[in-house]
C-alpha cells in the first residue's frame, strides 16, 4: 500500500545545501559532495551534522585519491588512468591491484539554523575528522541520538581494513569522547533508540554477510552502549521489490502510540535508493508489527535523479514536531534536501500494509 505522494512534502528550497555552500577543509581540497546529515536540536536551534566528501584536483592522465595518514594528515595517492591494474567504474570507489580506495574522503561538519531551512556554520564548532588507522578513509553518515543531555553519535568508520560503526559522545558539541568501534566490519547504518527498554539500550545496525544472508537490518541490546549483544535480524531484503539488494536503518526510531517508527532506506540491484518505514513493538522491538510494501518516497525530483551518484535518496537524520517528521536527506549523494511527512499518514500506510500481508 503506497503513501499518497501528495503527503510527501519536499521543501520548495531544495536542495537546501550544495557543495559550493561549504568551505573545503584546506586549500588542497575540493568539496565534491554533501551527504546524509545527522540531525539534532541543541541550544534552541536545529543542527545538521553534514558528511562533507572532498577530493583533490584531478588531471586528465591521473586519478588521485585522498587518505589520512597515522598523524591524521591528508595524503594523496595517484593512479594512471590507463594502468591496466586500475578499475574505476563506480564514482564512489576504485580498485587498484586488488585493493579498494574511496575516491573522496569524508569528515563531519556542523551547521545550524533557526528555521530548519537556512543553515550556517557557527563559530567555535570544529569539524570532526577521522582519526587513526580504522578511519584512514574518513568517517560517514552519522546518526545522532539524544539521551538526557548526552548526544550519542554512531557513524561509519572507513579504512582499508573494512567498514564498521564508531561511537562518540558529547554534551556540548565541542568536546567529544571517542568510544572506538562498537560494531566491527562489515557493518554500518547504526541508530541507537532514544529510550531504554526494560532497562537496556537498543540499536539497529546493518551487518553484511557475503555468502549466506545479505544486507539486513539487525537489532542489538546493551547495558553500557559499548558492548552489544543478543543480536536479532529484524528485516531482510525482498526479492523483486524496491528493497531487494540492501536495506539499512535511518535515524533513531520515533516513539509513537502504535510502536517504534523507523524510516529506513532500501536499494534494488540497480542501486536505486528509496525510503520505507518499519513499525516495531514498543516493548519488544525485535517484533516487526508492519513494514512498507511500497516505498514512502522514491527518487523523482531532478536533483534526486542525477548527480554524483544518481537515483539516490538516503536519510539518517530528522527532528519531530508533533505530527510532522522533518526529514533531511542526501540526494544523488551530492546535495542536502528536506522533506516533511505526517507521522499519522505513515502509520496509516503501515497499518494498511499490515492488513495486506
Ligand atoms: C551507501 C551509504 C551512503 C550512500 C549510499 C548511496 O550504502 O553508506 O553513504 O548515500 O550508499 O551511494
Image (cartoon, helix red, strand yellow):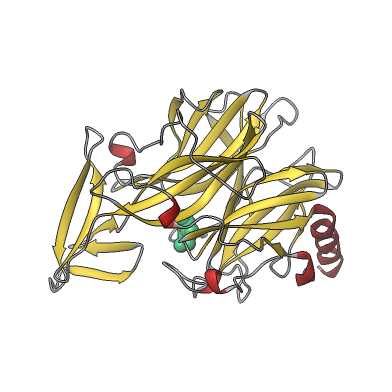
Image vertical order of residue 165 relative to residue 96, above or below: above
Near-viewer residue (322 or 111): 111
Near-viewer residue (178 or 12): 12
Quick one: quadrant of the C terminus? Answer: bottom right
Q: Residue at x 66, y 60 (%)?
A: 11
Image-based side of 281 in relation to 23, left or right: right
Image vertical order of residue 173 relative to residue 347, above or below: above
Determine which quarter of the picture holds residue 1.
bottom right
From the top left corner, tell me how far across and down residue 353 is, in percent.
81, 66
Q: Residue at x 45, y 61 (%)?
A: 334
Q: Residue at x 78, y 70 (%)?
A: 6
Image-based side of 348 in relation to 171, left or right: right
Determine which quarter of the picture holds residue 338.
bottom right
Tell me, yes or no, if residue 186 can be seen here: no
From the top left corner, tell me how far across and down residue 96 is, in percent.
20, 62
Q: Residue at x 52, y 38 (%)?
A: 154
Tell me, yes or no, if residue 49 can be seen here: yes
Determine which quarter of the picture holds residue 130.
top left
From the top left corner, tell me how far across and down residue 46 is, in percent.
63, 39
Near-viewer residue (85 or 55): 55
From the top left corner, tell me how far across and down residue 345 is, in percent.
83, 60
Number of residue marks? 0
Image-based side of 202 in relation to 308, left or right: right
Amino acid at each position: 500500500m503506497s503513501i499518497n505522494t501528495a503527503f510527501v512534502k519536499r521543501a520548495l528550497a531544495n536542495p537546501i545545501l550544495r557543495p559550493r555552500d561549504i568551505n573545503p577543509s584546506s586549500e588542497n581540497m575540493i568539496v565534491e559532495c554533501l551527504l546524509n546529515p545527522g540531525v539534532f536540536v541543541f541550544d534552541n536551534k536545529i543542527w545538521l551534522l553534514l558528511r562533507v566528501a572532498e577530493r583533490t584536483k584531478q588531471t586528465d592522465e591521473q586519478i588521485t585519491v585522498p587518505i589520512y595518514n597515522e598523524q591524521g594528515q591528508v595524503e594523496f595517492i595517484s593512479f594512471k588512468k590507463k594502468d591496466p591494474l586500475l578499475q574505476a567504474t563506480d564514482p564512489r570507489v576504485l580498485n587498484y591491484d586488488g585493493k579498494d580506495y574511496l575516491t573522496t574522503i569524508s569528515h563531519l561538519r556542523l551547521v545550524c539554523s533557526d528555521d530548519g531551512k537556512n543553515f550556517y556554520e557557527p563559530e567555535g564548532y570544529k569539524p570532526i575528522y577521522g582519526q587513526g588507522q580504522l578511519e584512514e578513509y574518513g568517517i560517514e553518515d552519522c546518526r545522532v541520538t539524544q539521551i538526557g543531555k548526552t548526544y550519542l553519535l554512531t557513524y561509519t568508520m572507513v579504512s582499508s581494513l573494512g567498514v564498521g560503526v564508531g561511537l562518540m559522545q558529547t554534551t556540548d558539541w565541542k568536546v567529544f569522547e571517542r568510544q572506538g568501534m562498537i560494531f566491527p566490519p562489515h557493518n554500518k547504518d547504526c541508530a541507537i533508540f532514544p529510550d531504554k527498554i526494560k532497562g537496556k539500550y537498543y540499536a539497529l545496525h546493518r551487518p553484511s554477510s557475503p555468502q549466506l544472508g545479505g544486507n539486513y537490518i539487525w537489532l542489538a541490546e546493551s547495558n553500557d552502549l559499548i558492548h552489544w549483544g543478543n543480536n536479532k535480524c529484524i528485516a531482510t531484503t525482498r526479492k523483486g521489490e524496491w528493497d531487494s539488494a540492501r536495506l539499512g536503518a535511518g535515524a533513531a526510531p520515533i516513539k509513537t502510540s502504535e510502536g517504534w517508527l523507523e524510516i529506513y532506506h532500501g536499494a534494488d540491484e540497480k542501486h536505486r535508493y528509496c525510503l520505507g518505514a518499519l513499525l516495531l513493538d514498543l516493548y519488544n522491538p525485535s517484533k516487526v508489527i508492519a513494514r512498507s510494501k511500497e516505498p514512502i518516497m522514491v527518487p523523482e525530483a531532478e536533483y534526486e535523479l542525477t548527480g554524483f551518484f544518481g537515483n539516490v535518496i538516503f536519510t539518517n537524520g530528522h527532528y519531530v514536531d508533533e505530527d510532522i517528521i522533518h526529514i533531511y536527506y542526501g540526494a544523488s549523494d551530492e546535495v542536502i534536501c528536506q522533506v516533511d511527512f505526517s507521522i499519522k499518514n505513515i502509520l496509516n500506510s503501515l497499518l494498511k500494509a499490515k492488513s495486506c500481508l
